[in-house]
Image (cartoon, rainbow, N blue to C red):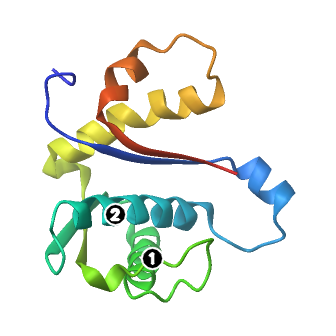
Amino acid sequence: MVAAAEFELFCSVIRKDRLKARYATPWNPYEIALLFCMERARERLLALGQKGRRVHVVFESRGKPEDAALDAAFRRIAANAGGWGFKQADFSLLEWEPLILPKRVNSSGLQLADLAARPVGLHCLRPDQPNRAFEILRPKLRALKDFP
C-alpha cells in the first residue's frame, strides 16, 4: 500500500551525540531538523510553481508546552528569523501555516510519517543493515539530511 501511494518524503536525521560533540551551540536538534525539511520542501514547492501559495505543514500534537515551542520555532523559520544555518532560504516566497493536530484525527499524512520515521532513522544509523521498509520508501524520498 505504501509503495503504491503517491507522496514524497523530506526527512532529516539529527545525530544529537555528534551535534553536541561537534558544535558548542544551544541549537535545538528538532528545530534544526524542521529547518532542513522546510528548506527542501520550499525548494520542491517553488520548482512546482507554488510561489505565493499557502502551505499547510501538519504536526502531531505533543502537549501544550511542546506544541507552543514547535509553533514558535516554525513561525521563526517561516519569517526568516532563524538567524542560523549554512544557507539562508527565503521562506517568505510561500505562505507557511502550521497545523498541530492530535493523533485522534487519524491523518493519513501523520500515519505515513510515523511509518517512515523508524526505517529512515535506522538507514542512517545502520546503513549496511538490511532494511526492507526503507527500500519501499526510497523511491518516495525527495530529501534526506543526515546531520552532522
Q: Position of residue 134 (x, y in %)?
A: 42, 23
Indicate which disc residue 43 carries.
Answer: 2
Quarter holding residue 127 = top right
Residue occupied by mark 1: 89
In the image, what residue occupies the spot 52% across and 79% down? 88
The answer to whether mark 1 and mark 2 are in CB contact below 8 A is: yes
- The amino acid at mark 1 is Ala
Q: In terms of sequence position, does the residue under pointer 1 or pointer 2 come before the other?
A: 2
In the image, what residue occupies the spot 25% across and 50% down? 103
In the image, what residue occupies the spot 26% across and 42% down? 8
Q: Position of residue 90 (x, y in %)?
A: 39, 82
In the image, what residue occupies the spot 16% across and 81% down? 52
Left or right of 128 on screen, residue 132: left
- The amino acid at mark 2 is Glu
Quarter holding residue 20 = bottom right
Q: Position of residue 60 (x, y in %)?
A: 31, 56
